Amino acid sequence: MKTIVEIITENKRTNMDIIDAAGKIIREGGLAAFPTETVYGLGADALNPEASRKIYEAKGRPSDNPLIIHIADMEALEKIVLHVPTKAEKLAEHFWPGPLTMIFAKSGRVPLETTGGLQTVAVRMPNHPVALALIRAAGGYIAAPSANTSGRPSPTLAEHVAEDMDGRIPLILDGGAVGIGIESTIVDLSGGIPMVLRPGAITIDMLRDVIGEVRIDPGIEVNPSAHPRAPGMKYKHYAPRAELILVNGAREKVLEKINDLAHQAAESGKTAGVIGTDESCGHYRYGIVKSIGTRSDADTIAQHLYKILREFDQQDVDVIYSESFSAPGIGQAIMNRLLKAAGQKMIEV
Ligand code: TXA
Ligand code: MG
């Protein structure tokens, strides 16, 4: 299959002819990749079981790992869930469109192929003009996982999608770099106390401010032995090909340790990658050193995380050493993704 990449935004305007063509592909049961504010998604008609199956095939994704349904308005929500809890209504008012996915009991209209066999469904209204226009053109319901092959870092540029999906899907809509860079926060509202299954740009504190008590799935905290409840969180994920090791501790000690490790790697004939920040990069003396962003604005770190992991893959490094990032705000989501990419390997200094 030939994959066409179309520039979808010019002078901040969405090309509606291309949106219509992409919408047609999806309505007819095909796949199209598109930008959202978090990461690029790989879209198909969420209510068509055959179309959902194509997503799993293109990604090489295990079929028990459910998909998120993307909608463009609240009316669409009522048709795919059994009921909308008041807390979900409140969260939607505050955070939709935006980087928040909510889990509900599903209605009969949603095929089990889309939910990986579950009776619950994950739903999100993305905050991106291209995504919203495409959802409308496609009939209202787009199932979309991140548009990477299973296990690789999520795509934050159309080029990343092409790297993984070239020849597997007919169309990639290129809307440039995404804004946030890591996937949406997932909160389960399908029963009991709301529980965060995946941290993201909407933090637990932001959720608590709106609906009160919110728990965090023990499986996503640093303890790797607990079993996460979002099926996708149990798989090795977001991972570069090279081994990734995090180093955590006081700033000076981290710098020293990473310098030592990168030096040792060089001595033994390996190429090391080093992930530092604008503040620290000048202090690293060995290996290929990259800044992930500035510690004065953690959003910049989220934006560049997956891009940097992919760049190290292209440069064929053998091992990557990374600084770690602390938990406030989006920092929790950054650490969650880095730890998963590292297979939980972290050295304390
Ligand atoms: O930001 C995002 O959410 C992006 C963009 C494209 O919208 N999408 C995304 O989808 O990250 P994906 O498929 O890569 O991750 C979806 C996660 C998986 O970990 C999956 O297991 C979980 O959501 N999930 C989906 N439905 C679920 C359900 N019914 N119950 C529990 N977890 C669910
Ligand atoms: Mg994903």
Image (cartoon, helix red, strand yellow):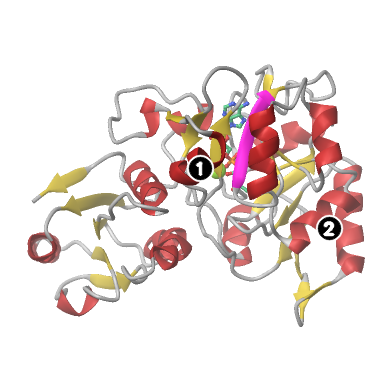
Q: Give residue 92's quadrant in the image.
A: top right
Q: Which residue, given by chain and number where applicable, does mark 1 sit on?
A: 209
Q: Residue at x 36, y 41 (%)?
A: 340
Give the mark, 2 or 1, whose residue is nearer the N terminus: 2
Span of residues in magenta? 100-104
Residue 86 x %, y % = 69, 29
Give the tally of numbered discs: 2
Q: Point out which mark residue 93 bears.
A: none
Q: Main secondary structure of the magenta part?
A: strand
> Tag 1's secondary structure?
helix
Q: Is mark 1 within 8 Å of ligand 1?
A: no
Residue 23 x %, y % = 88, 52
**117 is higher (above) or lower (below) than 199:** above
**63 is higher (above) or lower (below) than 300:** above
Q: Nearer the viewer, mark 2 or mark 1?
A: 1
Residue type at tag 1: Asp
Residue 193 x %, y % = 52, 22
> Tag 2's secondary structure?
helix
Q: Which residue, given by chain and number where applicable, does mark 2 sit on?
A: 133
Residue 32 x %, y % = 77, 52
**36 is higher (above) or lower (below) than 266:** above
